[in-house]
Structures are given as C-alpha cells and as structure tokens.
Image: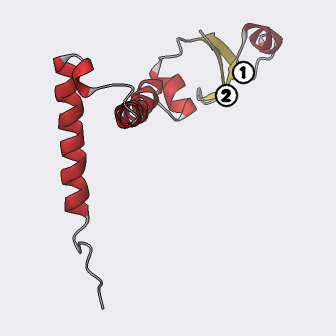
Amino acid sequence: MPFVRRNAEGRIVALLDAEEAASYAHLTAYSIEQLPGTHPEVIAFLGTDPAENFSGLDASFIRVMEDLIDVLIEKGVLRLTDLPVDAQRKLLARKDMRRKLKGALNLLGDRDVI
C-alpha cells in the first residue's frame, strides 16, 4: 500500500514509499497516510484505473493471439480442428465480426472515386 502526501487542502500531491513517508513525517505542512492502491483518491491521482488498462491490454493481446493462430494455420503447423470446439467457435465468430465491420467501414468499396 502506498503512502500519500496531502497538501493543506487535503488533496493528494504525491505517492511515497515507506522511507519517503518517514522523511516527511516531521513536516507539519503535509499530512501523510497510507491508502490501498485501489482507493478512489489514489486512482484519481494517478489519472488511470489499472483494471481498465489491463482490460485494454487483454483486448490487444487477444488480437495478437488471433493473428498468431492464423499464421500457424497458414503455415500448416496447426489446424483449426486441433483446437477445442468452443475455441473454434469463438475464433470464427471474431473473424466474421471483423469481416463485417471492415465491410461496414469500407463504404466506398474498391471503386475509384472521381
């Protein structure tokens, strides 16, 4: 759990480790306390919710895994049928969704526009 340093108005102005917190303990201008890293004020101070960042990384990683599976299938190292049925369904559903989204975003098609 990080230590937080608050200013006179009570706002968090710094996150500290135990050694840094001890060095500020004698200063009366600052309030030092320990809060969990998941505390709303700590998250607000950092400007980011770690859970949201992690899920964003998960989405990117899933795309990397899909691409990796595609390459392995293209090279003949893996067959789609080698995967469990649920994995096959999920991969095919994601491919279908990406294909549909790509078509929806390509409003002009392949024709040249004058």
SS for callout 2: loop
Extreme residue in the front direction = 76
On screen, residue 80 versus residue 34, left or right, reads left
On screen, residue 83 versus residue 40, left or right, reads left
Earlier residue among tags 2 and 1: 2
* The C terminus - image quarter: bottom left
Labels 2 and 1 touching (C-beta < 8 A): yes
Quadrant hosting residue 113: bottom left
CA gap, disc 2 to disc 1? Answer: 5 Å
Residue placed at 67% from the left, 17% from the top?
Answer: 31
The scheme the figure's colours follow is secondary structure
Quadrant hosting residue 13: top right
The label shown at residue 30 is 1
- Examine the rendered structure and indicate whether residue 32 appears above or below residue 75: above
Residue 26: x %, y % from top left: 81, 11
Residue 47: x %, y % from top left: 53, 35
- The residue singled out by tag 2 in the image is 7
Quadrant hosting residue 25: top right
Query: The disc labelled 1 sits on which kind of residue?
Result: Tyr
Query: The disc labelled 2 sits on which kind of residue?
Result: Asn
The label shown at residue 80 is none
On screen, residue 1 versus residue 68, left or right, reads right
Residue 60: x %, y % from top left: 42, 36
- Examine the rendered structure and indicate whether residue 74 appears above or below residue 108: above
Q: Nearer the viewer, residue 4 or 97?
A: 97
Residue placed at 25% from the left, 62% from the top?
Answer: 105
Residue 41: x %, y % from top left: 50, 25
Q: Nearer the viewer, residue 99 or 38?
A: 99
Q: Nearer the viewer, residue 14 or 69?
A: 69
